């Protein structure tokens, strides 16, 4: 599959009078067209610096970058014509209404039929009521919708979403995530940076975990979770603790179940792999066991991240297909 | 060069004027204050009619120099103060288009300022400032020199951010005063006069004064020196832009 973003061994160090800060250290990643790729890491991990390098706003010290086949240094204008960005850290110009502001950015991108396109994105983001309002007076939710509207003006081939939900109220963040899902369905290639693990898990096809300027691991959310999965656990919550002894005996008989340990009305089944859940369900039905729930216990991305960043022996992990 | 992207800059400024007191001050109040403070002092000193007209024309020249220099700088500063540099520089606009757009904004505002000051001079003091080719070319040189100083100001802003602003804003005042906006530079010692002749605004103000027979101007020299300044300042601007990219300052917020 064709790559939308191809970064190879990108390194960047910022020098000040007092010290040198290594922002990126041999970062490589490949984002396929139509994919939502997450760059997940804490504040100061190097996520925004990488986006700046990809867009040519900041130069690289070494390595190479291609976005839609364009080198940001040599073909920066062509590259930026076909991309756009939402930055959670950006401000807004004073003195312009929503319509004027969008028109201004439409001019910067030389969008054809500017007036009509501005109307379209206003409608798309449900901003009609704010058309003549000053953007700098918007609440954070409306402001974020403005940023998204601005980012869609030129129908970008690659959309950079840099911490799009940072500092937003929960309900607004949910709306923004829902918009991102819509864009994903429409086939946009998206590079999403976030330090919210659940957000990355929910939205991204693949994720790179970045910390202190280094990519620690990349792969699909499931593959990343698999990196620290030492054991596969299925939990069965019985309706009453009294049935635990009988249920335990039945579950032990299932092929692939290594052990069953009870804790109150919860039975923790250590299984060979998660396909054993079928056997568990069959047993529940056959033995008419009264249960509240059956669940697969998976590690979270948070646990993966902590493991990767706190355990130096873990090294750099690449799981699954990375270079399409 | 993309004309639409160039026009985006005057669009941003002109549409934003009503909500931006600084912009309003810059092209209405500030030139009027300058005009009356200088003109009223001149009235008190009771100069000849020619000297008085030369002083008034000098204030217009000062504003020409200021218009292009300040608008180049404020075009960038608007984005800096609003913390929108990231959105500006992630768009396809080139530095050439950005500079051309800001220059165009300055030129539009100067036309307005010129009419305003011309009318104020005529109505308040009964003086009709001569509009000859010499005057117009001299003003054009001042606008062009303002472009060079603007490039220098923006270069400083790229590299030093907030801390460069007070200094960068005073460029046009410094050079206007130094190159004899309202007086003849013959009041200075010869070595300083020789040095001042390396500054384009000295020639341009001499051009304005030549209308009253107070100074002489060689427009060929003036044009060459102005062009040289623009070329050198353009190079410095380009260097500063690349340095700012290297240091990550184009994307930084408010520093």
Image: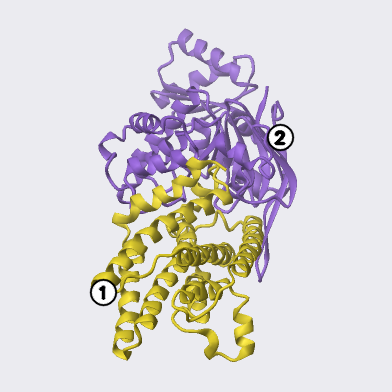
- Assess disc 1: are there few (<14), some (14-19) or many (≥20) residues with their C-alpha within 10 Å of its C-alpha: few
Q: For this view, does A30 lie left or right of residue B97?
A: right
Q: Nearer the viewer, mark 1 or mark 2?
A: 1
Q: In yellow, which chain?
A: B
Residue drawn at (58%, 31%) of the image: A221
| Labels 1 and 2 in the same subunit | no
The chain shown in purple is which?
A: A
Residue A300 visible in rendering: no
Q: Is residue B44 left or right of residue A79?
A: left
Which residue is at a point 35% across and 87% down the rendered structure image? Answer: B47
Q: Position of residue B212 (x, y in %)?
A: 44, 77
Residue A188: x, y in percent?
52, 27
Q: Is residue A165 above or below residue A121?
A: below
Instruction: Judge the density around disc 2: few (<14), some (14-19), many (≥20) Cα neighbours within 10 Å.
Output: some
Q: Which mark is residue B126?
A: 1
Helix, strand or loop at label 1? It is: loop
Where is residue A123 drawn, in percent x and y? 33, 29
Residue identifier under label 2: A318
Q: Nearer the viewer, residue B229 or A118?
A: B229
């Amino acid at each position: 599959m064709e790559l939308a973003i191809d970064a190879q061994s990108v390194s960047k160090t910022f020098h000040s009078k007092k010290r040198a800060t290594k922002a990126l250290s041999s970062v490589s990643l490949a984002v396929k067209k139509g994919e939502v790729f997450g760059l997940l890491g804490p504040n100061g991990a190097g996520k925004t610096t990488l986006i700046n390098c990809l867009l040519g706003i900041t130069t690289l010290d070494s390595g190479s970058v291609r976005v839609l086949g364009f080198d940001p240094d040599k073909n920066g204008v062509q590259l930026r014509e076909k991309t756009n960005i939402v930055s959670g850290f950006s401000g807004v110009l004073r003195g312009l209404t929503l319509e004027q502001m969008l028109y201004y950015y439409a001019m910067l991108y030389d969008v054809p039929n500017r007036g009509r396109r501005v109307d379209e994105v206003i409608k798309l983001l449900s901003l009609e009521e704010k058309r003549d309002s000053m953007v700098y007076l918007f609440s954070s939710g409306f402001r974020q919708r403005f940023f998204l509207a601005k980012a869609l003006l030129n129908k970008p081939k690659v959309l950079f979403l840099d911490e799009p939900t940072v500092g937003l109220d929960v309900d607004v963040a949910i709306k923004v995530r829902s918009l991102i899902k819509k864009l994903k369905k429409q086939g946009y290639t998206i590079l999403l940076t976030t330090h919210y693990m659940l957000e990355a898990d929910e939205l991204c096809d693949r994720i790179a975990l970045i910390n202190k300027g280094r990519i620690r691991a990349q792969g699909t959310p499931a593959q990343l979770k698999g990196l620290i999965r030492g054991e596969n656990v299925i939990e069965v919550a019985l309706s009453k603790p009294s049935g635990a002894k009988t249920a335990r005996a039945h579950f032990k008989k299932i092929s692939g179940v290594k052990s069953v340990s009870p804790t109150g009305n919860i039975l923790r089944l250590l299984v060979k792999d998660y396909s054993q859940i079928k056997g568990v369900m069959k047993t529940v039905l056959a033995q008419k066991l009264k249960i509240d729930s059956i669940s697969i216990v998976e590690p979270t991305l948070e646990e993966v991240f902590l493991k990767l960043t706190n355990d130096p022996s873990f090294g750099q992990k690449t799981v699954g297909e990375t270079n399409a | 060069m993309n004309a639409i992207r160039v026009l985006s800059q005057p669009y941003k400024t002109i549409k934003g004027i009503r909500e931006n007191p600084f912009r309003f001050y810059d092209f209405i109040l500030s030139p009027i204050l300058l005009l009356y403070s200088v003109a009223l002092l001149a009235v008190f000193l009771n100069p000849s009619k020619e000297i008085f007209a030369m002083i008034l024309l000098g204030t217009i020249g000062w504003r020409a120099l200021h218009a292009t220099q300040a608008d180049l700088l404020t075009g960038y500063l608007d984005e800096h103060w609003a913390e929108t540099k990231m959105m500006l520089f992630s768009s396809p606009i080139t530095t050439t288009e950005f500079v051309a757009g800001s220059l165009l904004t300055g030129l539009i505002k100067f036309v307005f300022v010129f009419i305003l000051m011309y009318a104020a001079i005529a109505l308040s003091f009964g003086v009709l400032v001569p509009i000859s080719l010499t005057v117009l070319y001299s003003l054009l040189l001042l606008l062009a020199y303002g472009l060079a100083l603007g490039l220098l100001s923006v270069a400083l802003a790229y590299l030093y951010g907030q801390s460069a602003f007070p200094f960068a804003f005073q460029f046009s005042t410094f050079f206007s005063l130094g190159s004899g906006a309202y007086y003849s530079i013959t009041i200075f010692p010869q070595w300083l006069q020789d040095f001042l002749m390396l500054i384009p605004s000295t020639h341009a103000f001499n051009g304005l004064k030549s209308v009253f027979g107070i100074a002489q101007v060689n427009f060929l020299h003036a044009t060459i020196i102005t062009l040289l300044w623009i070329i050198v300042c353009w190079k410095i601007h380009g260097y500063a832009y690349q340095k700012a990219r290297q240091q990550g300052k184009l994307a930084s917020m408010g520093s």
